[in-house]
Structure formats: C-alpha cells, structure tokens
C-alpha cells in the first residue's frame, strides 16, 4: 500500500499533464479563429472592391453606348444639313447663270442699268463664295464624323467577333462538362460560364473538388492568352441560412470564399494576368430560379471585353 506522500507524488504529474492538454487545444482553436477572421475581413474587402469595379464597368459601357447613339444622331443631322446646302448651292448657281445671261444681253444697253446689274452680280458672287466655304467646312466636319463613327463601329464589330470566337473556344474546352451543371452563354456582349455547386464544391464546403478543378483548369487554359478581357468570378448561394458552427458567418461570406477559391485555381493553373481577374460574392440575392435552390447555388465566371479603347474613340 502506497504511503500518502508517495501517492501525492504520483498523482501530481498526471494532474499537471491533464491541465496542459486543454490549454494547447484552446490556443490552437484561438489561432484558427483569428486566421479565419482575418481571411473573412480580407474577402469582404475584395468583394466590396469587386462590386464597385463591376458597377463602374457597367456604367462605363452605358456611357459609351449613349455616346455612340449621340454620334449617330449628329452624323444623320449633319448629312441632312449637307444635302440642304447642296440644294441651296444648286439654286444659287442657277440664279448666277440667269444673271450672267442678262448681263450679256444688256452689255450694249443703258450704262446705269449695266452698273446696277454688275453690282447685283458681284453680290451674288460673294454670296456664292460664302456658301461654298460653309459647304466645304460642313463637308469636312461630316467626313470626320463619319470616319469616327465607322472606326467606332469597326471596333465594336471586332470586339463582338472576338467574344464570339472566345465563346466558341470556351464551349469547346468545356464540352465534357456541359450538361453536368455547366452552361456557357453569350449575352449583352459578355460570356457567362455558369457552374453549379454540385460540379465544384461538396455540400457546405469552400474547397473545390477534383471534378470542379478539372473544369476550371480547362477554362483557365482557354482564356489565358486573352489580353483584351476582364474576368469577374461571382459566388451565389441559395436562401438557406448558415448553420451554427460553420466557418463562415452567412451566405455573403460563403459566396465570397467560394469565389476566391475559384480565382486561385484559375490563376494557379494558367498564365492569367491577376490584374484582369476579380472575385465577388452575391450571396442569395441574384437567383436564376427562385423555385430551384440547386440552380441558384453556383459560380458564374463572367468574361467581358475591355472597353477602354472604345472610350478613347468617343472622347471629345
């Protein structure tokens, strides 16, 4: 039988060891919580920046379209003025010819009448010269407008053709995945690659599985050489609330974290310029079908043409 002091010497180390283990677990849990909080704050900041840039891009395209419409209207107006000036010049030429004919007939008549006729002829000649100068200036302005409009239309056509070619290339690269939760569409001058979560993420996870990674790698390779392009990766969720204990606060956090996971794979697997790629979360607020939660849980990769060159063309 152990004596009391011997028993205490045996029990004390066991108690100290039992106390250290929970402390280490607590510190490790605290560090993980701090890391998650910092990741959440960084993701939220990137999401806000992405939303602002996307709004700016939409506003810029709308300004460009309004400017194009204005140029077309101005060109039509100048064309009408040009045709009106040509008709006026033709009428003045006719009057001039009539006066010259009268001048020839009256050369032998009264000198005072001849002087009046000569004065009238000189007045008409000066008016004709003024009209010709005005017509030349109007013609030059009209030609410049038409050239700018033609250049702008050519650039728009080039971008539309480039986006159609890119859409075909992306569809071809992702052929094996279409019909398995992936669609490729072209709308409003942009290409929308929509990937349902079942193709990318296990339930409740922000880590892309191997099947989703394969699709994203093929997409990245299809667009990595594009220079005249902006890429927005949007995360979307359904309306289900986040369960207690989840590593993210709400659907906003979940959508942003999934978008950033996709962006990392796109960049790591290709030569994409990170300056043209933006990650953003839309939460549950942009559903494609309110009655189908599975379709609403998705990632949308939106490929947009860079419009800066068009903006330069329409600037005054």
Image: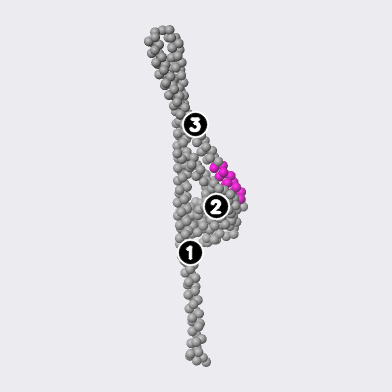
Q: Nearer the viewer, residue 41 or 252?
A: 41
In the picture of the structure, the residue carrying the numbered disc 1 is: 36
Q: Residue at x 42, y 16 (%)?
A: 121
What distance separates the C-alpha of mark 1 from that of mark 2?
A: 27 Å
* Percent position of residue 81, x then y: 44, 28
What distance separates the C-alpha of mark 2 from that of mark 3?
A: 40 Å
* Percent position of residue 134, x then y: 44, 26
Secondary structure, mark 3, is helix
**Magenta span includes 49:** no
Q: Nearer the viewer, residue 96 or 38?
A: 96
In the picture of the structure, the residue carrying the numbered disc 3 is: 143
Secondary structure, mark 1, is helix
Q: Residue at x 62, y 52 (%)?
A: 176
Q: Which residues are magenta?
A: 159-174
Q: Residue at x 50, y 42 (%)?
A: 310
Marks 3 and 1 in Cβ contact (< 8 Å): no
In the picture of the structure, the residue carrying the numbered disc 2 is: 273
């Amino acid at each position: 039988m152990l004596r009391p002091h011997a028993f205490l010497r045996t029990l004390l180390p066991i108690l100290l060891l039992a106390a250290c283990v929970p402390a280490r677990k607590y510190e490790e849990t605290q560090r993980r919580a701090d890391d998650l909080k910092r990741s959440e704050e960084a993701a939220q900041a990137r999401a806000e920046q992405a939303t602002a840039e996307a709004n700016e891009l939409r506003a810029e395209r709308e300004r460009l379209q309004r400017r194009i419409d204005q140029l077309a209207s101005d060109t039509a107006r100048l064309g009408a003025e040009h045709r009106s000036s040509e008709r006026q010049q033709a009428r003045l030429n006719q009057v001039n010819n009539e006066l010259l004919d009268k001048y020839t007939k009256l050369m032998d008549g009264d000198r005072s009448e001849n002087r009046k006729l000569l004065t009238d002829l000189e007045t008409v000649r000066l008016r004709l010269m003024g009209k010709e100068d005005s017509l030349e200036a109007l013609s030059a302005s009209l030609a410049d407008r038409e050239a700018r409009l033609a250049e702008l239309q050519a650039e728009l056509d080039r971008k539309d053709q480039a986006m159609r070619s890119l859409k075909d290339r992306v569809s071809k690269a992702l052929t094996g995945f279409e019909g398995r939760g992936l669609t490729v569409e072209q709308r409003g001058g942009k290409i929308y690659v929509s990937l349902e979560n079942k193709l990318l993420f296990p339930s409740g996870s922000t880590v892309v599985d191997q099947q989703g990674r394969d699709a994203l790698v093929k997409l990245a390779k299809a667009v990595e050489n594009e220079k005249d392009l902006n890429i927005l990766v949007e995360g979307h969720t359904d309306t289900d609330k986040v369960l207690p204990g989840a590593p993210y606060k709400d659907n906003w956090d979940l959508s942003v974290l999934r978008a950033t996971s996709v962006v990392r794979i796109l960049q790591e697997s290709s030569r994409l310029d990170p300056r043209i790629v933006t990650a953003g979360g839309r939460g549950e607020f942009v559903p494609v079908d309110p009655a189908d939660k599975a379709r609403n849980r998705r990632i949308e990769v939106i490929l947009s043409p860079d419009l800066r060159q068009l903006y330069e063309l329409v600037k005054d």
